[in-house]
Amino acid sequence: MGSILDKVFLDNSLRSYIIVAGSLLVIFLLKRLMSRYLAGLLYSFVSRVSKGVDKKSFVKLVVSPLEIFLLLLLSVIVVNELTFPKAINVVIYKATVHEFIDAITTIVLIITFISLLLRVMDFIAMILHLRSDQTSDPADNQLIVFFKDFFKALLVIIGILMILKFAFSYDISALLTSLSIAAAAFALATRESLENLIASFIIFFDKPFTMGDIVKVNNIQGTVERIGLRSTRIRTDEKTYVTVPNKQMVDSIMDNLSLRTQRRVLQQIELHADTSHDNINQFVQRAKNIFIQKKEKVENYSVFLLNISKNAFVIQVEFFTAPIPVANFNELRQEINLALIKLMEELNVKLVAKDADLVR
C-alpha cells in the first residue's frame, strides 16, 4: 500500500495529491464557519469605530466575500505544497504556465480582498448615514458620501498597485514618483478648488453655520439653503440665489444672525431746542411707560437724555427683544414708534431733524 501512495505522477506522489485533496475538502466544508468567525472578529473592530452597529447585518454583508477570499487563500496555500509539473510548464510569450497561473491567482486574491474592504466601507458609510439622518444638518450626508467615495477610490488605486507589484513584479517606486509629481501639478492647477474643498471640511467640523441659518458675509445676507463641497448657496432677502465659495465663508468675517440672543433697536430722537424742561422730563418718563406696558415683548430698554446741543435735545431710545421673526419684530417696532409719535403730539414737542434709526 505504501508503494502505491509513493508512486509519482506529474512530479508529485499520490500521497501528496490525497493530502491536498483532503485539505481542500476540509477547507470547503469549514469555509462558512471560518468566515463567520472572522466576520465576528472584524465586527468587534468596526463596532469600536462606529457604535451601534448591528452585528447580524454586518456579518450577513461581509461573510460572502470573506468566504470566497478565505477559500481562495487557503486553497492557494495548500495547492502550493505540490510541485508544479515540469511537463506542462511550457513557455507562453516569455512566461511559463506556472508564472501565468501565479499571476492570475494573485490578481484574483487581491481583487477579492479589495472587494471585501469595499463592502466594509459601504457598511460603515451606511451606519454614518443613519446617524446623520438623526441630526438637523443635511451637510453631514454630503461629507459622508465624499469620504466614502474618496476612500473607496484610494482602495482601488492601492489594489491596482498591489497587482502591478505582486502579480507582474513591476517596480512601482517610479510609478509612485510619477503619481506624486502628477498630484503636485494637479494641486497647483486646482488650487482654488482644493482651498474650497478644505474650507468645506472646516465648515463641516467647526460648524460656524448650518443649513437654514441666516448669515451675513461680504455684504450678502440671506438663508443658507445648501452647503456643498465647493460653495455655499444663500437665498438672499431679495429672493436671489447667491453662490459663495466656501473659502470666503471661512476667511471672511461672517455674522450668523440665527445665533443672536436678542434683536436690538437703537434710535435717537432730536427734540427742538425750544422744548421745556418739564416736557423733556415727561417725554422720558412716559416713553418708559410705553415699554413697561409691552414688557411681555420687550426684554430690556433704556430711555434717557443723551446730549444737549444748540439746536436740539437728543433723547436716546434703546430696547431689546427676543430673537423673534423679522415680521413680528417690525410690527413691534412700528407699535412703539407710533406710541412715541402720539406722545410727542400730546406733549406738543417737535423734532428738529429726521431721527437716525439703527437696527441690529
Image: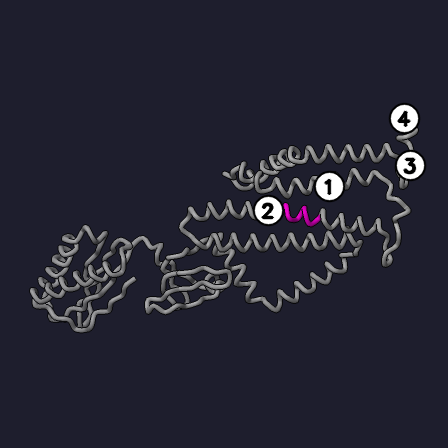
User: What separation in Å lies between label 3 and label 1 (alpha carbons)?
Assistant: 26 Å
In this view, 212 is above or below 276: above
- Say what amino acid the circle numbered 2 marks: Arg
Q: Give how far across and how far down residue 129 sits, in percent.
A: 48, 48
User: What separation in Å lies between label 4 and label 1 (alpha carbons)?
Assistant: 33 Å
Depth check: 356 or 49 in front? 49
User: What separation in Å lies between label 1 and label 2 (alpha carbons)?
Assistant: 18 Å
Asked if labels 1 and 3 touch by Cβ distance under 8 angstroms, the answer is: no
Q: Which residues are magenta?
A: 110-121
Please tell me whether the stretch drawn in magenta is mainly helix, strand or loop.
helix
Asked if labels 3 and 2 touch by Cβ distance under 8 angstroms, the answer is: no
Question: Which residue, given by chain and number where applicable, does mark 4 sit on?
Answer: 1
Asked if labels 2 and 4 touch by Cβ distance under 8 angstroms, the answer is: no
Secondary element at image label 2: helix
Marking on residue 319: none
User: What separation in Å lies between label 3 and label 4 (alpha carbons)?
Assistant: 14 Å
Depth check: 236 or 208 in front? 236
Question: Which residue, given by chain and number where applicable, does mark 1 sit on?
Answer: 73
Q: Give how far across and how far down residue 307 sits, in percent.
A: 21, 65
* Neighbour tally class for label 2: few under 14, some 14-19, many 20 plus, Cα within 10 Å: some
- Is 332 one of the magenta-colored residues? no
Q: Residue at x 85, y 34 (%)?
A: 16
- Say what amino acid the circle numbered 4 marks: Met
Of mark 1 and mark 2, the one earlier in the sequence is 1
Q: Give how far across and how far down residue 269 sits, in percent.
A: 19, 66
Question: Which residue, given by chain and number where applicable, does mark 3 sit on?
Answer: 8
Of mark 4 and mark 1, the one earlier in the sequence is 4
Question: Which residue, given by chain and number where applicable, does mark 2 sit on?
Answer: 119
User: What separation in Å lies between label 2 and label 3 (alpha carbons)?
Assistant: 44 Å
